[in-house]
Image (cartoon, grey):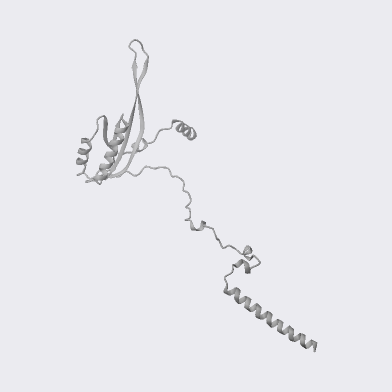
């Protein structure tokens, strides 16, 4: 009799625990609780991040650096029956401001007249020493140093009909003390843009010999 009563009581207690557990589970699901309350073990520590926080793949791929090539002279175009070839408009003078502004004026004039300008560059400054001899003596001393500044505007494929108009405007606006010269472009003019290095040339000559 006692054993039968114990079994009945145990079955009732089990049913009560199952009902309580189900009601508790339904309350947990209906109420919003933080995830950390339900999870006792920190499983995310062993899980991969799948590249979270990385941005390298979003950046564009950097191109490999190219070695600087040596500057080479361009091929000189020959003149035709209706167009000029490549020629240089050389502007020189002792006042650097006048020379620079006049070369810029020529460049802007070419752009306005749709004349092709290959390049505009400056040549190395040349220094000239003015020597004066004393009245009673044979020794000479430096009285002044004159610096000549030169700019070059290289023009190509200018039409023959446009050349007189271009020259008239350029000569009309030529400032005082500035020398203007037009000549055909050659390989020597290209080499004149660079400063000579006697020490390096001497070493190269020794190596070649």
Vertical placement of 170 versus 129: above or below?
below
State the residue at coordinates (21%, 39%). Answer: 169
**x then y, percent, for residue 109:** 25, 42
- The residue sitting at 71% across, 84% down in the picture is 12
Question: How many labels were placed on the picture?
Answer: 0
Q: Residue furthest top?
A: 136
Image coords of residue 80 (percent x, y): 24, 46
Q: Position of residue 143 (x, y in %)?
A: 35, 19
- Residue 56 position within the rendered picture, expressed as x and y whole percent measured from the top left: 52, 56
In the rendered view, does 206 fall on the left or right side of 178?
Answer: right
- State the residue in front, 166 or 13: 13
Residue located 30% across and 33% down the image: 99
Image check: 73 left or right of 45? left
Q: Is residue 187 above or below residue 146?
A: below
Left or right: 110, with 51 as reference point: left
Q: Quadrant of the N terminus?
A: bottom right
Residue 95 occupies quadrant: top left
Which residue sits furthest right? 2
Vertical placement of residue 24 versus 56, above or below: below
Q: Residue furthest bottom?
A: 1
Seen in the image, is 11 located left or right of residue 46? right
In the foreground, 119 or 174? 174
Vertical arrangement, residue 190 with respect to residue 16, above or below: above
The quarter of the displayed image where residue 5 is located = bottom right
């Amino acid at each position: 009799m006692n054993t039968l009563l114990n079994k009945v009581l145990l079955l009732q207690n089990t049913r009560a625990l199952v009902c309580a557990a189900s009601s508790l589970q339904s309350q947990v699901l209906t109420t919003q609780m933080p995830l950390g309350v339900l999870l006792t073990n920190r499983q995310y520590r062993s899980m991969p991040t799948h590249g979270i926080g990385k941005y390298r793949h979003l950046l564009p791929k950097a191109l490999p650096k190219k070695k600087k090539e040596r500057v080479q002279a361009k091929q000189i175009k020959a003149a035709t029956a209706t167009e000029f070839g490549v020629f240089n408009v050389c502007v020189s003078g002792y006042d650097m401001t006048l020379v620079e502004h006049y070369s810029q004026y020529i460049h802007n004039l070419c752009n306005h007249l749709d004349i092709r300008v290959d390049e505009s560059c400056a040549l190395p400054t040349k220094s000239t020493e003015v020597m004066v001899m004393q009245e009673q003596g044979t020794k000479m001393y430096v009285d002044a140093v004159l610096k000549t500044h030169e700019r070059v505007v290289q023009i190509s494929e200018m039409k023959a009909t446009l050349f007189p108009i271009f020259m008239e405007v350029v000569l009309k606006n030529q400032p005082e003390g500035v020398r203007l010269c037009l000549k055909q472009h050659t390989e020597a003019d290209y080499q004149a843009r660079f400063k000579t290095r006697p020490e390096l040339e001497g070493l190269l000559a020794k190596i070649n010999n």
